[in-house]
Image: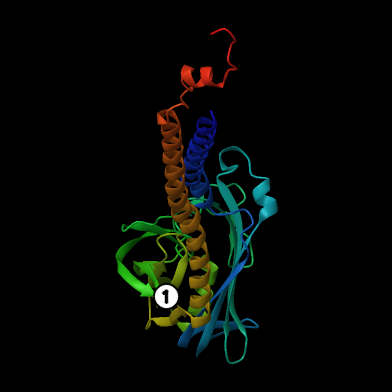
């Protein structure tokens, strides 16, 4: 009985550990492979050396040349996320994003925008949400975000993704171009090429530019090019590095084109290091709970279950204590007189 009890405890403990391992793989890891509700705000900085850019100061238009710094801050909006309903409830998180571009020499603001969007917690893509907006002119504009913007899917694949471009108000394909080591992490590199596409600008804005940069012109357009390269951690879908080679050109009906923007923006070293650190921390958690912990639990569970079976078998195979011979019993009895 003692062997059976011990064996049952060992076997039951082993089965319990196997169940815990399955729970980590099929429940805990998928739950961790989602954008958390309590994600901390993050800031990324990209710099462009010797950029040519349009600058409007007190209503005066000028084309200047200087180093630029672009700062993007992503702030999860837990309150608004908690108010989501319908198909978005539990599936999406709301992020508030703001960007400023300033000259590094004078600290003057060159441009800025703000937006709010809902992201799929697994795919990282923008979802349809009634309260999304974009403000890059001083007035909030209702837009329809889609595709990848600030996040790729968990478990990114070697394929083409659609990346949203703010200037075009739409997505364009970003092709997988290969792998590259970014500070110890094998990243997936994707490239989106936009070539001389016309921007949909207000007529008054174009006329303002023509009046200063192309006197005599009666009409014109602004064309936009951008080679956007993103390096993605394929495990977490996080951006590790971003480079954008942007160009905007005013093309008047009369006169020579005027360059409005010619800049090569790329994450600075501090931003790359911080992005890699966040990705490594997330990877370690996923690997620990999704791989090593289940493997350890499976091995220990199998050992305990096998030990339990062996203990029970040994107990069953051990012979019971044999009773002593009757002769021995008789010998211990007192002699009976007369015999």
- Residue 230 point in image, percent of width and height: 40, 69
The residue closer to the viewer here, 211 or 104, is 104
**Residue 241 horizontal/vertical position (percent):** 44, 73
Residue at horizontal 42%, vertical 43%?
Answer: 302
Look at mark 1 in the image and give the residue it sits on.
243
The reply, left or right, for residue 92 in relation to residue 83 is: left
Place of residue 82 in the rendered image (x, y in percent of width and height, measured from the top left)? 67, 47
Which of the two residues, 271 or 247, is positioned nearer the viewer here? Answer: 271
Instruction: Kindly indicate the quadrant of the structure image that contains residue 198.
Output: bottom left
Residue lying furthest bottom: 105
- Work out whether 81 lies above or below 259: above
Question: In front here: 325 or 336?
Answer: 336
Q: Residue at x 45, y 55 (%)?
A: 292
Q: Position of residue 19 (x, y in %)?
A: 49, 39
Q: Residue pushed farthest front? A: 338
Q: In this rendering, would 109 be left or right of 47?
A: right
Residue drawn at (49%, 62%) of the image: 284
> Given the current orientation, which residue lies at the most extreme right position?
79
Task: Answer whether residue 219 is visible to the viewer in this image.
Answer: no
Q: Dot 1: within a 10 Å radius of its alpha carbon, few (fewer than 14), some, or many (20 or more) residues? A: many
């Amino acid at each position: 009985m003692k062997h059976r009890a011990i064996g049952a405890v060992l076997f039951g403990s082993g089965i319990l550990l196997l169940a815990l391992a399955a729970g980590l793989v099929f429940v805990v890891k998928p739950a961790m492979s989602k954008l958390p509700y309590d994600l901390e705000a993050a800031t990324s900085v990209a710099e462009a050396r010797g950029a040519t850019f349009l600058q409007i100061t007190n209503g005066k238009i000028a084309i200047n040349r200087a180093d630029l710094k672009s700062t993007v801050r992503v702030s999860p909006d837990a309150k608004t996320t908690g108010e989501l309903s319908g198909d978005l409830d539990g599936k999406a998180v709301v992020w508030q994003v703001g960007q400023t571009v300033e000259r590094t020499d004078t600290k003057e603001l060159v441009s800025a925008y703000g937006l709010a969007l809902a992201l799929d917690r697994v795919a990282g893509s923008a979802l349809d949400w009634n309260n999304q907006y974009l403000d890059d002119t001083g007035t909030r504009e209702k837009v329809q975000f889609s595709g990848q913007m600030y996040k790729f899917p968990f478990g990114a694949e070697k394929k083409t993704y659609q990346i949203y471009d703010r200037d075009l108000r739409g997505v364009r394909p970003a092709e997988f171009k290969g792998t590259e080591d970014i500070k110890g992490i094998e990243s997936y590199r994707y490239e989106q090429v936009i070539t001389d596409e016309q921007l949909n600008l207000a007529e008054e804005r174009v006329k303002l530019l023509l009046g200063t940069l192309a006197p005599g012109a009666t009409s014109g357009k602004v064309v936009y090019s951008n080679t956007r390269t993103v390096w993605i951690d394929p495990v977490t879908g996080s951006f590790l590095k971003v480079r954008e080679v942007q160009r905007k050109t005013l093309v008047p009906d009369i006169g020579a084109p005027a360059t409005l923007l010619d800049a090569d923006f790329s994450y600075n070293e501090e931003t790359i290091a911080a992005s890699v650190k966040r990705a490594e921390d997330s990877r370690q958690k996923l690997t620990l709970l999704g791989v090593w912990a289940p493997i350890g639990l499976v091995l220990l569970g199998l050992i305990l279950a096998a030990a339990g079976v062996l203990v029970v078998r040994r107990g069953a195979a051990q012979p019971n204590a044999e009773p002593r011979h009757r002769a021995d019993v008789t010998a211990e009895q007192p002699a009976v007189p007369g015999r």
